[in-house]
Amino acid sequence: MYLPKIRELKEAITALIKGPYTHPFPKLPTPVPDNLRAAPKYFKDYCIGCGACGEVCPARAIKVEDITSNGKPIRRLTCDYANCIFCGECHLNCTTEKGIQLTPEYELSYFEEKEALEIIEHELVLCEICGGVIAPKSQLLHLYEKLGTIAYSNPTIYLTKMEEFQLIDESARQEDRQIDRWDMVRVTCPTCRRNILLKEEWG
């Protein structure tokens, strides 16, 4: 039997005195590098509900739904961390650049499937003529701030800013309603606005 080398014996004694070289996980969390790109997270103050994150997600981990909740139309964005691959496309393509951001959180273990979901909701603005979805209110307000005085060329945007619109439910839709020139100064979807312009120009 060969005698251990002096160097190996020294390392063994040092390990017994100072403890292991590895990090004491899971007793203590593993230190996270500064440039680690991990789970994305929504930030309510900056997210405008545009849905760009869901459009660019290659793993289809972000679901965008326009639904009715408690009698109000809302847009629900759901991020499923069970499918997320931490690619960062949602953050890179965010309209406000801060609505969804990557965090250093990577230890994503859950007891229930619903715990892996992050949900954020935004109030929707509906067309006052056909009842169709225009955009989330927060998105229109974002456009108002970005466009400045140019926003007053679009009644839907500036009326939303002044809160002079009202949301209508499905039962209040009037699909056979005759539009006229006064509907130009209303909250309308692109299709209805085009029909109003055509009627104004060609009768």
Image: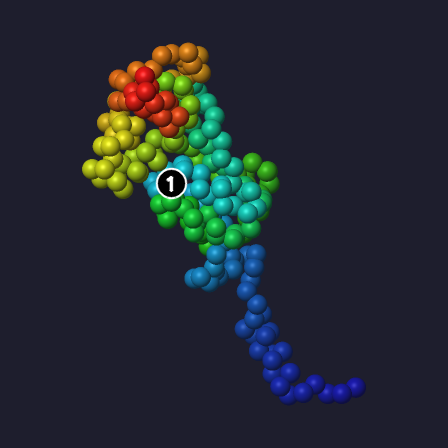
Work out whether residue 115 or residue 15 is closer to the camera in this orientation and state it: 115
Figure colour scheme: rainbow
Q: Point out the image quarter for the C terminus.
A: top left
Q: Give the crowd class for mark 1: few <14, some 14-19, many >=20 residues within 10 Å.
A: many
Q: Is residue 130 above or below residue 123?
A: above
Residue lying at the far left in this picture: please name it: 149
Q: How many marks?
A: 1
Work out whether residue 32 or residue 45 is closer to the camera in this orientation and state it: 45
Q: x, y percentage for residue 13?
A: 60, 79
User: In which image quadrant can residue 124 be found?
Assistant: top left
Residue at image position (44%, 38%) is 51
Residue at image position (38%, 31%) is 135
Residue 37 visible within the image: yes
Q: Point out the image quarter for the N terminus.
A: bottom right
User: In which image quadrant can residue 2 be found?
Assistant: bottom right
Work out whether residue 175 or residue 14 is closer to the camera in this orientation and state it: 175
Q: x, y percentage for residue 58?
A: 55, 47
Q: Is residue 174 above or below residue 78?
A: above
Q: x, y percentage for residue 196?
A: 33, 21
Residue at image position (56%, 59%) is 25
Residue to which mark 1 is pinned: 47
Please, what is the three-letter code of the amino acid marked with disc 1? Cys
